[in-house]
Image: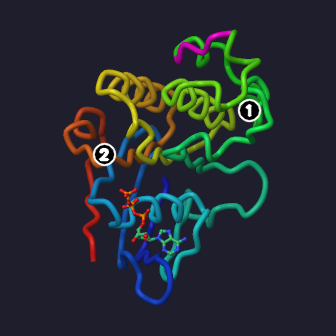
Amino acid sequence: MLEARNLAAGFGRKPLFAGLNLALPKGQILGLEGPSGAGKTTLGRTLAGLHPALQGEVTLDGAPLPRRGRQPVQYLHQSPLLAMNPRWRIGKVLCEAAPVSEAHCSAFGIEAGWLQRYPHELSGGQLQRVSILRALAAQPAFLIADEITASLDQISQVQIWQLLGGICRREGIGLLAISHDAPLLSRIVTAGQITLSRG
Ligand SMILES: Nc1ncnc2c1ncn2[C@@H]1O[C@H](COP(=O)(O)OP(=O)(O)OP(=O)(O)O)[C@@H](O)[C@H]1O
């Protein structure tokens, strides 16, 4: 279980959110929605241990997140290009944490021809698939997926969320699905939806 208790985070003295509690069981999908600037990314990064809490705590199975080593909570960036080494070919990017599973590669339609290319030589949707696979290879207990389809067409959005949601349910990975798109979230969530409001 990934839990936040009485959590506050932000920048400077005034937190973006405070007193936040949530519990995400493994194998379940929790939706997080809210307007632009409400702090969804900040909350996602705090849950992944990438941003410090101002108050409260984040725990995984009752213990604090590990500071070093393989991270059990993997954060998927809205813009995967920003989260990849531009000098690495896709084949190397994919295996950054550990070798990727062939079953996952085939489920996400990874093509052999992509492996020799650099990140800027793939489309946004192709790159997001690579980013998801790289995170899955790290065998996470939880995934924080932050607006991972925001720049894609409607059909690709639904395909990617359904594919990822199916893998998480089957493999017992807890998924926090962050999106502005409440109807899209309602199609995939299994553990309800929370809303962050601005101010
Ligand atoms: N490094 C930073 N320093 C100061 N303020 C920041 C920093 N990063 C984000 N902010 C501010 O924190 C607020 C919340 O940002 P955040 O990205 O968490 O919101 P969001 O809900 O994810 O927005 P969006 O839906 O537009 O992605 C915004 O006002 C943003 O400008």
Find ligand 1 in the image and state its quadrant.
Answer: bottom left
Residue 160 circle label: none
Q: Residue at x 41, y 31 (%)?
A: 165
Residue 13, given in percent of the width and then of the height, sits at 47, 90
Instruction: Residue type at mark 2: give it.
Output: Ala
* Frontmost residue, 83 versus 28: 83
Q: Name the residue furthest bottom.
A: 13
Relative to 69, is 185 above or below? above
Image mark for residue 93: 1
Query: What percent of the width, then of the height, locates residue 130?
Result: 61, 28
Disc 2 packing (10 Å; few <14; some 14–19; many ≥20): some
Task: Please provide the residue range marked out in magenta.
Answer: 108-112
Q: Quadrant of the C terminus?
A: bottom left
The residue lying at 49 percent from left, 45 percent from top is 78
Earlier along the polypeptide chain: callout 2 or callout 1? 1
The single residue placed furthest to the front in the displayed view is 121
167 up-or-down from 113: above or below: below
User: Label 2, on which residue?
Assistant: 191
Does residue 111 lie above or below 125 as drawn? Answer: above
Q: In terms of depth relative to the viewer, which is nearer, 175 or 63? A: 175
Left or right of 168 on screen, residue 89: right
